[in-house]
Image (cartoon, rainbow, N blue to C red):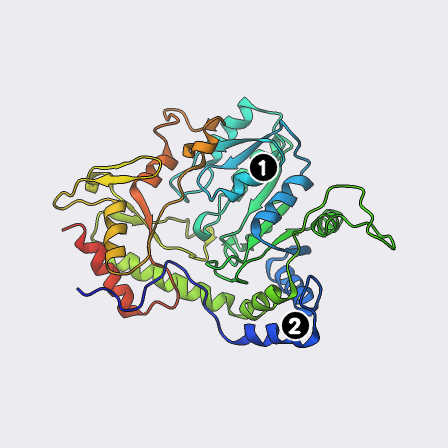
Amino acid sequence: MEPFKKRVWLSSPTMHGDEMNHITEAYESNWMSTEGENLVEIERIICEKTGCRYGVPLSCGTSALHLAIKLAGVKQGDNVFCSDMTFGATVNSVVYEKANPIFIDTEYDTWNMDPVALEKAFEMYPDTKVVIVVNLYGTPAKYDEICAIAQKYGAIVIEDAAESLGALYKGKQTGTFGKYNVISFNGNKIITGSSGGMLLSDDKEAVDKARKWSTQSRENAPWYQHEEVGYNYRMSNVIAGIVRGQLPYLQEHIAQKKAIYDRYKEGFKDLPVTMNPYDESTMAPNFWLSCILIDEKAMCKQERSDTTTSFVTEKGKTCPDEILQTLEKYNAEGRPIWKPMHMQPINRMYEFVTVEGNTRECNVGADIFHRGLCLPSDNKMTEEEQDKIIEIVRSCFE
């Protein structure tokens, strides 16, 4: 096989033209900064779409997470339960407030926070008042179980829905299950603004407070008056124009992503792999990224340090790093599964809670990281290109 002449991306922005109309509108009206019609409109549309009553557009999902942590009242030295398998931004928002993240292991059913491990964590630390739950790769967590456990202990749920805009759990949009909820418009997300994010909540007072904090906590005075610490976290009207132009295409993007997922599933049905899982009776993911988990018996030897990898090729077997290197050889972009937070050097002083029988070294998240990978999931990828990706992956098992 020849390499792809044009690179096949993991997940790149899919633009439609409407975005430029709204950017031009911001330019021609001279509303280029942090006020303007685009901001008003995306706030309205997102709230209408998700069902959350209030929202504030922000510079990125991380800033939304940080403000959610502050709204939840997290203080220095507090414990915060966090999904373990996630991007570092989820945890950084906790550390910004000098609190202690405690990582909750993953479960195989959804690759999200394990409710059994969460219950165990509350038994160990019953005074913990905040839980941050991530919807990994666009698949909802088990919110009935997780929210019931949090409510039992009087804890607030923050939903990190950065990856899951448009996904459903029991018919309800993600980004609505927490007291405070976060979505992202980063460049590779299903809806992009090149950057940006939003904080969502049904609590108007909280959203108004976040809006104030995001504009350097300016008081209502004739001059710049400040009575508390603030942040430069507001989204610009230009970025909002891109998001506004993207939003009408959300369902189209989800349908394209699902078609990619289903095509991979069919293409790999006789291989010793499984796709990133979800419960079809309760969940409708947005299928942001399609991933595979290699059966343990089909894994060749693979070893990873903090920054390097090595593997030993073996007939009939493969491993994530062999597949990723092979994809790269053909000019296609894959990605390892998020390395669990408890395995990151910066987080090794923080506690990790898993279910009985597991250890910090041997647990569900570590296993999925070891055996899993994200495949090219760009919704501009043609069927012919995806067929070639499938053929490349299959060749690694020969």
Quadrant in which residue 333 is drawn: bottom left
**Lateral position of residue 190 relative to residue 227, left or right:** left
Q: Secondary structure at mark 2?
A: helix
**Residue closest to the far right:** 222
Residue 39 position, x and y percent, is: 67, 64
Q: Residue at x 32, y 45 (%)?
A: 372
Q: Is residue 268 visible?
A: no
* Type of the residue with mark 2: Ala
Q: Is residue 247 visible?
A: yes
**Lateral position of residue 356 relative to residue 67, left or right:** left
Q: Which residue is mark 1?
A: 94
* Type of the residue with mark 1: Val
Q: Residue at x 37, y 26 (%)?
A: 358
Compare marks 1 and 2 and give the one earlier in the sequence.
2
Residue 2 position, x and y percent, is: 19, 65
Per the rendering, the mark at residue 2 is none
Q: Which residue is mark 2?
A: 26
Residue 271 position, x and y percent, is: 21, 51
